[in-house]
Image (cartoon, helix red, strand yellow):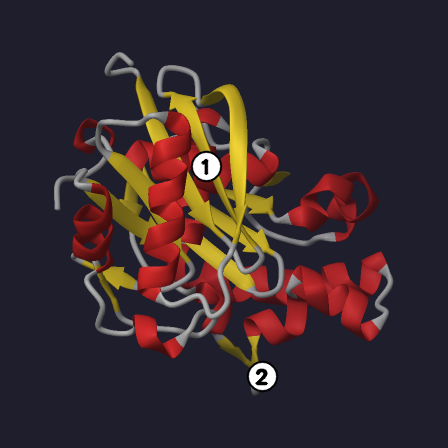
């Protein structure tokens, strides 16, 4: 593989997805590969699955991996959506110990945000790009002129006594049987709070529900332009591949 290719691995609740990414275009090279997320999904169990992914792709260079958690200098700091045993784990050391390869890890929403800002709906936009992933919860990424402000966790904002992701995550629409206009009104409240804090120049909305953006985006109210994400469920994987090369990111 040349410098322009990198391996990205996206760890989800039910599946671990991997793929080789062309860093010039953000496109997946060849076929991706999926492994069922182990139960329990402890750091060492996930690292073993990542080792299987490395073997599948015959990979021999640096790689990146997403984790649904706050990560500082490779160490997991929160476990809202993963096994509590992750807290305090230097996951990059664990991954490198299993694979004998340089490993980088980042928050899953940050990975998706980086990918959208470089290759997707935010490509070419200067200033502050806010990317929200609307899934089981709400993940967030804040990008300024292509550089990431990590671990923002805006889905945990308190809005009139309710946590933002409990108000307007994609899963909430299904859970509460909301119409698109009603759900979009809730989402607009979340965007309004984000705008007070960040004054974004562009807001990109991702997650599975973004595939149906034509049914609800026109109901969303925001001062900043709002567009649907472009990369779909590959965004996290692509962002993970990006983080494996420091030339694409701020140095640690």
- How would you rate the neighbour count of disc 1 (Cα within 10 Å): few for under 14, some for 14-19, many for 20 or more? many
**Residue nearer the viewer, 239 or 129:** 239
| Nearer mark to the viewer, of 2 and 1 | 1
Pointers 2 and 1 in contact (C-beta within 8 Å): no
Q: Where does the image place residue 25, in percent across and percent down from the top left? A: 43, 16
Above or below, comparing residue 160 to residue 101 in the picture: below
Dot label at residue 236: none
Residue at 32 percent across and 32 percent down: it is: 242
Q: 129 or 50: nearer the eye?
A: 50
Instruction: From the viewer's side, name the closer residue of 73 and 43.
Output: 43
Q: Which residue is mark 1?
A: 18
Horizontal relation, residue 8 to residue 121: left or right: left
- Look at the image and tell me whether residue 142 can be seen: no
The x, y position of residue 31, in whole percent, is 54, 23
Provide residue 230's location: percent of width, then percent of height: 59, 31
Residue in view at x 57 percent, y 50 percent: 223
Indicate which disc residue 160 carries. Answer: 2
């Amino acid at each position: 593989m040349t410098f322009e290719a990198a391996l990205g691995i996206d760890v989800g609740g039910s599946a671990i997805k991997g793929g080789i990414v062309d860093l010039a275009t953000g496109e997946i090279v060849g076929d991706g590969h999926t492994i069922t997320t182990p139960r329990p999904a402890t750091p060492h169990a996930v690292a073993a699955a990542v080792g299987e992914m490395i073997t599948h792709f015959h990979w021999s260079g640096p790689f990146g991996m997403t984790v649904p958690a706050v990560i500082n200098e490779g160490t997991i700091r929160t476990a809202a959506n993963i096994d509590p045993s992750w807290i305090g784990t230097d996951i990059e050391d664990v991954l490198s110990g299993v694979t004998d390869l340089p490993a980088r890890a980042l928050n899953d929403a940050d990975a998706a945000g980086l990918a959208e800002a470089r290759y997707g709906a935010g490509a070419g936009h200067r200033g502050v790009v806010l990317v929200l992933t609307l899934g089981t919860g709400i993940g967030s990424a804040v990008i300024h002129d292509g550089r990431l402000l990590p671990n923002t966790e805006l889905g945990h904002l308190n809005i009139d006594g309710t946590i933002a992701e409990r108000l307007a995550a994609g899963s909430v629409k299904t859970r509460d049987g909301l119409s698109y206009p009603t759900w979009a009104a809730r989402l607009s409240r979340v965007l309004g709070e984000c705008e007070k804090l960040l004054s974004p120049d562009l807001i990109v909305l991702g997650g599975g529900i973004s595939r149906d953006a034509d049914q609800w985006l026109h109901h969303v109210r925001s001062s900043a332009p709002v567009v649907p994400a472009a990369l779909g469920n590959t965004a996290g994987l692509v962002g993970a591949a990006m983080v494996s090369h420091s030339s694409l990111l701020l140095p640690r």
